[in-house]
Amino acid sequence: MTKRIRLGVNIDHVATIRNARGGEHPDPVRAAQLAAHAGADGITTHLREDRRHISDDDLNNLEKGITLPLNLEMAATEEMLEIALQHRPHAVCLVPEKREEQTTEGGLDAAGQINTLKPIVEKLTAASIRVSLFIEPDETQIKAAKALNVPVIELHTGHYANSVNEELASELIRIEQAAKLAKSLNIEVHAGHGLTYENVMPIAALDEIAELNIGHFLIGEAIFIGLEASIKRMRYLMDAARAEDKLDFLVKHIPL
């Protein structure tokens, strides 16, 4: 069997549901703990400038309440840099952020922002925080990531997730080629955005990808089947995609 692919669970939208009414419920820390029990390898959360879901208090509580590695998604700003240096999560993923967007709309333009990103990457790295860049599966962006000396990139899979037929196949090839290029440059490859039960397996099957970060779909599915079941099903599909003998895997591991 090829190397197991990791699953990072993004718990932002547990906070979105809580914030719709206010109060303390549902609790993102409890969601993170359930995710760990269900087989997640890490917890991802995005502290946005407008605090639309995860709050500073949530970050404090997650820091105290979980044992899995915490991956903090954040914009490349001085405010967020200061917060990251204060909390020192396992990893920081630098992402583009626009106040008016409903969700992250695309990858960070690392190639066009090298001078802005360089000091932020250097300060995070000096604090022993693993830095990644959320970028498009594009050669120019990957080479910019290499120039910035980041150890990890996360490929934006949103266009793949929203494609069908020939365009879907083309997007998958683009992601595969980008992942191969990054790995050849000794950059660890992650991927995420828009992944579901229906589209995750072709991405998870790419041996060059070490980790998937998935959130919105899992939280939505949890409304119907529960969070642990939602995550376990995703974990099963990712493992099935990596199995050398997929038919044998399916026979032995048919989920209940």
Image (cartoon, rainbow, N blue to C red):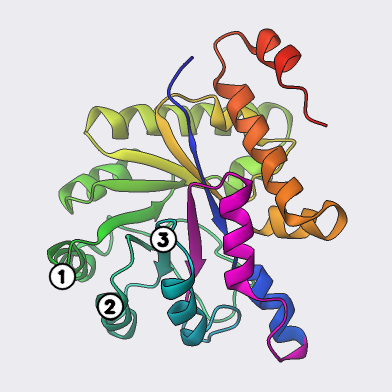
Q: How far from the left and from the top, in percent, is residue 86?
A: 27, 81
Q: Which mark is residue 81?
A: 2
State yes or no: discs 2 and 3 in contact (Cβ < 8 Å): no
Which numbered disc, 2 or 1, marks the residue that appears first in the sequence?
Answer: 2
Could one spot residue 123 in this view of the protein? yes
Q: Is residue 236 above or below residue 53?
A: above
Relative depth, front residue between 85 and 66: 66
Q: How far from the left and from the top, in percent, is residue 113?
A: 26, 64
Q: Which mark is residue 71?
A: 3
Residue highlighted by disc 1: 123
Q: How far from the left and from the top, in percent, is residue 173?
A: 51, 26
Say whether residue 116 is left or right of residue 58.
left
Q: Residues within 10 Å of mark 1 (few under 14, many from 20)?
A: some
State yes or no: discs 1 and 3 in contact (Cβ < 8 Å): no
Q: Is residue 227 above or below residue 84?
A: above
Say whether residue 123 is left or right of residue 132.
left
The image quadrant of residue 28 is bottom right
26 part of magenta stretch? yes
Q: How far from the left and from the top, in percent, is residue 178?
A: 39, 33
Q: Which mark is residue 167?
A: none
Q: CA distance from mark 1 to mark 3?
A: 17 Å
24 part of magenta stretch? yes
Relative depth, front residue between 60 and 196: 60
Q: Is residue 207 above or below residue 187?
A: above
State yes or no: discs 2 and 1 in contact (Cβ < 8 Å): yes
> Which label sits in the foreground, 1 or 3?
3
Q: Which residues are magenta?
A: 21-47
Q: At label 1, which amino acid type do we have? A: Lys
